[in-house]
Each structure stands twice: as structure tokens, then as C-alpha cells.
Amino acid sequence: MIGKLNHIAIAVTDLEKATAIYRDTLGASVSEPTDLPSHGVTTVFVELPNTKIELLQPYGDNSPITGFLKKNNDGGIHHVCYEVDDIHSSSAKLVAAGARVLGDGQPKTGAHGKPVLFLHPKDFCGTLVELEQA
Ligand code: CO
């Protein structure tokens, strides 16, 4: 069902510093920061030859990553995103297999303007999984 690794998301408290680490220390090409108020995050994408790293910093007071950063003061890997061909049929198969889809279970528009949904970390080896329709 899952295809390519679309990105790995890393939550950070200081987006400027994290961007500088990827750009200057690691020599990667990085995007400008983008505020996504509806997702409660500001993102920077690091472009790698085979995938992307998504740097996430909380945006606003009700960011979904604030709790994660309270537990992980230095930041850390927040989720992995796999591509699927059809998000509705993938979701239906996963729910039938007993997996929990977060939120209202319906895909939302993600950071790349494509439909995404998130799967409960307890059902996937302790890792928050994002599915994106490629
Ligand atoms: Co993501």
C-alpha cells in the first residue's frame, strides 16, 4: 500500500537555527519558511536528492506540536510521511485492519496542497505516520 517516503518531519523550537544547521552545516538546500495557520505550524522544507525533511515550529497558541516539544526539549522526529495512490481506499483498509485515523478520520489538505491524514502512533511502532496522496 505505501509507496515512497515523502518526508520526515522534525519538530524544532527555533526554526531559524534549525534551518541554518541544515543549510550551512549540512549543506542542504532549504525553502523559505511558510506559516500554515490551519495546521498550527511554520514549516521549512529541506530538499534532499531522494526525499525531504520537514522542519516544524509551532505557530499560534494551539499548535499540535507544542506538547511534543514540551517532552522533547531539543526537538526530535515528529512523524514520517509515506505516499499512497488513493488515500480514501488506504484509509478504509487501515480502519478495517483496526488502525486509528486521527481527527475526524477525513483527509485534510497538507503542506503540499495534497490530501493527507495521520495514523495513531500506538498502532504504528510508536511513530506518528502521515499518509499523503501522491
Ligand atoms: Co508532514
Image (tube, grey):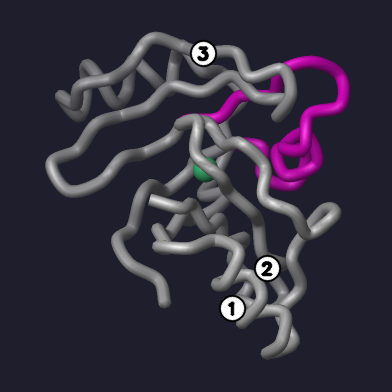
Q: Position of residue 32 (x, y in %)?
A: 38, 9
Q: What residue is shown with label 3?
A: 34
Question: Which mark's residue is nearer the viewer, 3 or 1?
Answer: 3
Residues shaded magenta? 55-74
What's the distance in space between the residues labelled 3 and 2, CA to CA? Answer: 26 Å
Q: Is residue 60 left or right of residue 55?
A: right
Q: Is residue 72 above or below residue 95?
A: above
What's the distance in space between the residues labelled 3 and 1, CA to CA? Answer: 30 Å
Q: Is residue 18 left or right of residue 94?
A: left
Q: Toward the viewer: 57 or 120?
A: 120
Q: Is residue 6 left or right of residue 102?
A: left
Q: What residue is shown with label 2?
A: 121
Q: Is residue 37 magenta?
A: no
Q: Amino acid at mark 3?
A: Thr
Compare marks 3 and 1 and give the one earlier in the sequence.
3
3 and 1 marks in contact (CB < 8 Å):
no
Look at the numbered disc 1 and give the secondary structure of its residue. Answer: loop
Compare marks 3 and 2 and give the one earlier in the sequence.
3
Where residue 125 is drawn, which disc sits there?
1
The image quadrant of residue 62 is top right
Q: Position of residue 87 (x, y in %)?
A: 54, 61
Q: Amino acid at mark 1?
A: Cys
- Near mark 1 (Cα within 10 A), the count class, few <14, some 14-19 or many ≥20, is few
Give the residue at x 65% y 56%.
118
